[in-house]
Amino acid sequence: MTIKKIKEELKVSDHPVVKSLHHGAAFKVLILGFRKGMILKEHKARVQSKLTVLEGAVIFKEENKAVELKQYDEVEIPTEIMHSVEAMEDSLCILSQGE
């Protein structure tokens, strides 16, 4: 139901919608929902993380590089580096964090 809730909330949201899919003592799995043009503003990952696109397309930006990710593409997110995510189209991503 998590993805369905995100899609419903996106209809009226002006920012990305993020919800926990699963978590444990040393890991988290989050689902991020975007409408086209939404930006997850710059922030740092404190733990090892990987972003995978389930639907749509996003641009992952870190320091001086930008990587376009389409459905099923993934990127390792380095810790302690400023980064952001911008949706090129309506998108759903999964973010896994932890060891």
Image (cartoon, rainbow, N blue to C red):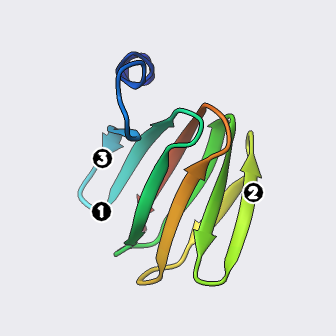
Q: Secondary structure at mark 3?
A: strand
In this rendered view, identify the residue nearer to me: 75 or 98. 75
> In the rendered structure, which amino acid carries the disc numbered 2?
Glu
Counting residues from the start of the chain, the first of labels 3 and 2 encountered is 3
Q: Nearer the viewer, mark 3 or mark 2?
A: 2
The disc placed on residue 58 is none
In this rendered view, identify the residue nearer to me: 25 or 32. 32
Q: Nearer the viewer, mark 2 or mark 1?
A: 2
Q: Which residue is mark 3?
A: 23
> Does residue 80 sit above or below 36 in this rendering?
below
Q: Residue at x 43, y 16 (%)?
A: 4
x, y percent for residue 75: 66, 63
> Does residue 2 sit above or below 86 in this rendering?
above
Q: Label 2 neighbourhood size at 10 Å, few (<14), some (14-19), many (20+)?
A: some
**Left or right: 3, with 55 as reference point:** left
Residue 24 is at least partly visible in this image: yes
Work out which quarter of the rendered image holds the N terminus and state it: top left
Q: Which residue is mark 2?
A: 68
Q: Residue at x 52, y 44 (%)?
A: 94
Work out which quarter of the rendered image holds the C terminus and state it: bottom left
x, y percent for residue 33: 47, 35
x, y percent for residue 16: 41, 41
**Mark 2–mark 1 distance (CA, rounded to whole Å):** 29 Å
